[in-house]
Amino acid sequence: MKKMLKVLTASAALTAMMASPALADTSTAIYYNDELLNTTQPVLNVDGRTLLAFRDLFENLDGEVSWSDTERKASVKYGKTTINLFPDNGAAQINGVPQALDVGPQIINDRVYLPLRFVAQSLGGTVDYTQDENGNATIQIHTIDSVQNFAQKDGKVLSILRTTGAPVNSIQPNKDTQAAYNSWQQNNAVYFLDDHDNLVEVQSYDTKIQVNVINYADAKVDSKTYDAGVLYPALTSVAQNGKTYTVGINETSGRYLGVGTPSSTREECVLDTSAGYLSVYKGRDNNSILHFNTSDDSVNIAAAASSGKVLDLIQRAIIPEDSSYAIASNGNYAFMMNGQLLIINETNEILEDVQLTNHAGDEQIFAVGNKFVSIAVENGQHYPEIYATVYKANGNVEFAFHNISNLSKVAVDEKFYPYTHLEMKDIKMFGDTVYILAKTNMDYYIVTYDITSNKSTKELLNLKEKTYDGFIYTMDDVKLFAADDNYFYLRDVK
């Protein structure tokens, strides 16, 4: 239910303040969050800008409107936002911050008028102006408190109103569950776009999994909750397999690298590698996984039954902080451990054992068919860079370890900002292309690497784009993604 507000009435002193002549447009209908406003004052056009009467708009908000004769200031408060208007000089503030306006607030026919776009922007929303062939105009204002899950596209960025969210966890951790709780805090949500072009948000809380399917084209959110069977289910990567997406639950890492943990205490063999001896076991992954099929929107949670190989890293002098593995189409394995690349076949024969770098930072290895592509931050130079190498599954090198980011190489007319730190905030493989969200001391970059052509690109993100969390999968490519309390943001990468 809408709350009728105490509405500003200009004092007698204001009647002397008259604005320049304005053109009335009596055929304009104004909709605020899809509800027609019963306006009492005409919509005006001043210097090519559409102006609305202060009263006509803000009596539809749940706020407090006031006028100060001393400061000659009109104010409205709603939620965490305060708008101050100074019609004498056309100035405006949002939460005390001055706003730059082509046309400011002004008094016309004893009423305070505001620019339409400033109104919408101050409410954290959007405004659309349309006119039919008969000259009748319609103004649609959608704000953050709208029930509509609208989307808007601005250049490469798509913004979707956030109306979803899992309940706050209610089961508090104890000594036995603290570790699982800490992992859950870092990994309680994953996102992807399905083949229906829906944004899918998977969240976990307590012993539950909540799947929010967001159809922004039809302004619809479909939420379903499932029992995960475990307390504090930590969600991990989304794997694409046709139209089925898999979310790992409570995956663990540590001394073992490969498929889960050893299925028995009996090792297959001991490998003599350049970084020391490593035991090979038959591994088995017994973690729970969530399958989400985008064709029929079915979801099921079950135990994974995959098996394979696992290395025992406890035999190394120092267990690597960053390590990963990949399995080629022919069943051969590749492991990355602190800059060391190890490739073995199904009979545990070492096909390649090479220290790509002694100064590895973040690192990741992927399998593409019968090829392995390893990506690592090379810290052993004046400006750290991202390096890549491509090996065939038989251990033969295809592209040697080389720089694919070239962040320190800029054109003559470009500004270079020296840096000492480089990390990969996120990295995804899609098709034959690796997508990397890289961060230096101050800047963020998108780095792509095509393993077929051995070509790479970089793009410096602007200041407003430094809030992106990482990449999410679509059926056709990947996109940069971020979520805050109000919106989801999707940015095209290509």
Image: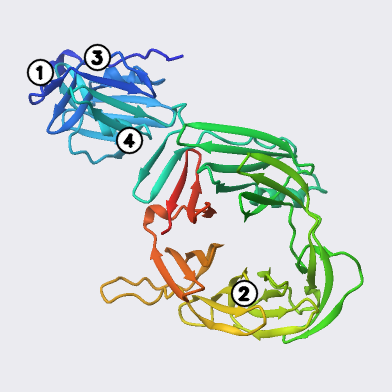
Which badge, 2 or 4, comes first in the chain's sequence?
A: 4
Task: Please state which amino acid type lies under the numbered disc 2.
Answer: Phe
Q: Residue at x 36, y 30 (%)?
A: 82
Task: Please determine whether, in this image, residue 424 is positioned above or below residue 236.
Answer: below
Name the spot of residue 211 as percent of width and height, x first: 63, 39
Q: CA distance from mark 2 to mark 3?
A: 72 Å
Q: CA distance from mark 4 to mark 3?
A: 24 Å
Question: Which quadrant would residue 97 be assigned to in this image?
Answer: top left
Name the spot of residue 393 as percent of width and height, x first: 66, 78
Q: Is there CB contact under 8 Å for labels 1 and 4?
A: no
Which badge, 4 or 3, comes first in the chain's sequence?
A: 3
Q: Quadrant of the C terminus?
A: bottom left
Element under label 3?
loop
Q: Residue at x 52, y 77 (%)?
A: 387
Q: Nearer the viewer, mark 2 or mark 4?
A: 2
Q: CA distance from mark 2 to mark 1?
A: 77 Å
Q: Is there CB contact under 8 Å for labels 4 and 3?
A: no
Name the spot of residue 114 as percent of width and height, x first: 23, 27
Q: Is there CB contact under 8 Å for labels 2 and 3?
A: no
Which badge, 1 or 4, comes first in the chain's sequence?
A: 1
**Numbered circle sitting on residue 372:** 2
The residue tagged 3 is: 9
Element under label 2?
strand
**Numbered circle sitting on residue 121:** 4
Q: Is there CB contact under 8 Å for labels 2 and 1?
A: no
| Residue, far left | 21
Task: Please state which amino acid type lies under the numbered disc 1.
Answer: Ala
Q: Residues within 10 Å of mark 3 (few under 14, many from 20)?
A: some
Task: Please determine whether, in this image, residue 218 is positioned above or below residue 364.
Answer: above
Q: CA distance from mark 1 to mark 4?
A: 30 Å
